[in-house]
Amino acid sequence: MMPMDKTHPGLFPIGSRLQHKKTGGFYKVIGLAKVEATLEMAYVYLSHQTNDYWIRPQEEMEDGRFVLVTESIS
């Protein structure tokens, strides 16, 4: 079985740390998945603030509202 980041490439690699431009929140990309009902690709990501897991359509996630964080976050 191939790793997800090789079978479904995305702008943000698995393990990436992101910041939401509007809210300032920090997140970690867990993976890419298909939404069962639509077969649309979506990111699975973890909120550093609440420890909740979220999913967001790949197209929406990559539209500029998130930026890649290169420095370490707590």
Image (spheres, rainbow, N blue to C red):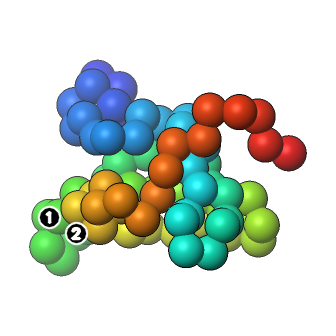
Residue at point 67% right, 66% down? Answer: 25
26 or 7, which lies in front?
26
Give the labeled residue for mark 1. 39
**34 is higher (above) or lower (below) than 15:** below
Residue at far left of view: 38
**70 is higher (above) or lower (below) than 43:** above
Q: Marks 1/2: CA distance?
A: 5 Å
- Can residue 37 be seen? yes
- Can residue 29 be seen? no
Q: Residues within 10 Å of mark 2 (few under 14, many from 20)?
A: few
**Numbered circle sitting on residue 15:** none
The image quadrant where one finds the C terminus is top right
Quarter-wise, where is residue 7 in the image? top left
Q: Position of residue 45 (x, y in %)?
A: 53, 56
Residue at point 71% right, 33% down? Answer: 71
The image quadrant where one finds the N terminus is top left
Q: Residues within 10 Å of mark 1 (few under 14, many from 20)?
A: few
Give the labeled residue for mark 2. 36
Task: Say left or right for 12 vs 60.
Answer: right
Quarter-wise, where is residue 61 in the image? bottom left
Residue at point 25% right, 35% down? Answer: 9
The amino acid on which the numbered mark 2 sits, given as a three-letter code, is Glu
- In the rendered structure, are the residues bearing label 1 and label 2 in contact, judged by CB atoms less than 8 Å apart? yes
The amino acid on which the numbered mark 1 sits, given as a three-letter code, is Leu
Quarter-wise, where is residue 20 in the image? bottom right
Q: Which type of secondary structure does the marked residue at label 1 adopt?
A: loop
